[in-house]
Image: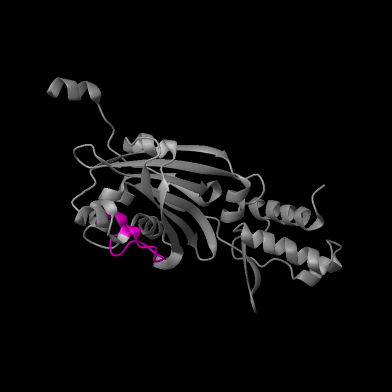
Amino acid sequence: MAPKWRELADKLAERIRAGDYAPGAQLPHIRELVEAGEGSKSTVHAAYKALEAEGLVTSSRGHGTVVRQQVPLKRLGIARYDKAKWRDSDEVAFIADRVASGRTYRRNEQTQTVSLVEAPPAVSAAHGLPAGAEVYARARLVKEGEQPTHTLTSYYRPEHVEGTRIVDPTPGPAGRGGGFRVLYDAGYEIDHMKERVFARAATPDESKLLQLPPGEPVVELHRTTYTADGTVVEFAIGVHAASRFAWEYEFQVPDSATDKEDS
């Protein structure tokens, strides 16, 4: 049986999703729910903290607990990688998503660790490396305010990034333009990508790190980035909180029959 605070949190979450508490509405004060028999002060407080961790409400002194806008972030497709964004400006991919979503951001909302590791099998396969080869793993946790949205770990061959800002663990993108700009400056201009996405159950560690509500799945992304000659310069694995993103793609519809006629 779920603890009392969890039952209350789920009950309130259901009312929020049903529209009983609209975005911007204030939830009842803790004492009101206590007086209504919903539980002790500590029970209601724990329920409200759970709702906050799940991104449904915000709490602040003087304003109480308020229902958040539940519009998910746009996770752009092709447009987030526009070279003009990172090569000529400083709009790295996660920032491009925030701008398109009309949301604020801070560069330090992306934290990271960098380490030299033995390549996992999927990474070895993507880079065409033998088993046991070492790669640089650049692992990021991205947040919107205090709420985590996703993790992304990029794997690079050492000869491509040794001595560059990519292996600098300073929080935030790897300097102006981020990792793609670093590769560009090193002579590895990205040309095309392949992305594979699939949903799955979150692991306990992922649920804790991303502050997921019980039972929420994650969307896993595998991204392979190539230069024009087919060299793989990055293989990345991302884990996204399913409810915090809307994946958006816009592209030209191909006509392979016409393409064959023209060749």
Question: Whole-percent x and y of residue 223?
Answer: 37, 42
175 in the magenta segment: yes
Up-down relation of residue 95 to residue 218 (above or below)? below
Up-down relation of residue 160 to residue 66 (above or below)? above
Magenta-drawn segment: 166-181
Question: Whole-percent x and y of residue 35?
Answer: 86, 68
Q: Nearer the viewer, residue 32 or 175?
A: 175
Residue extending furthest toward the bottom: 62
The quadrant in which the C terminus is found is: top left
Residue at 64% across, 78% down:
61
The answer to whether one can see residue 142 in this image is yes
Residue extending furthest toward the left: 263
Q: Main secondary structure of the magenta part?
A: loop
**Relative side of 75 to 156, left or right:** right
Up-down relation of residue 170 to residue 221 (above or below)? below
**Relative side of 216 to 195, left or right:** right
Up-down relation of residue 108 to residue 167 (above or below)? below
**Relative side of 51 to 3, left or right:** left
Q: Nearer the viewer, residue 29 or 47?
A: 47
250 in the magenta segment: no
Tell me how many marks there are.
0
Colouring style: one colour
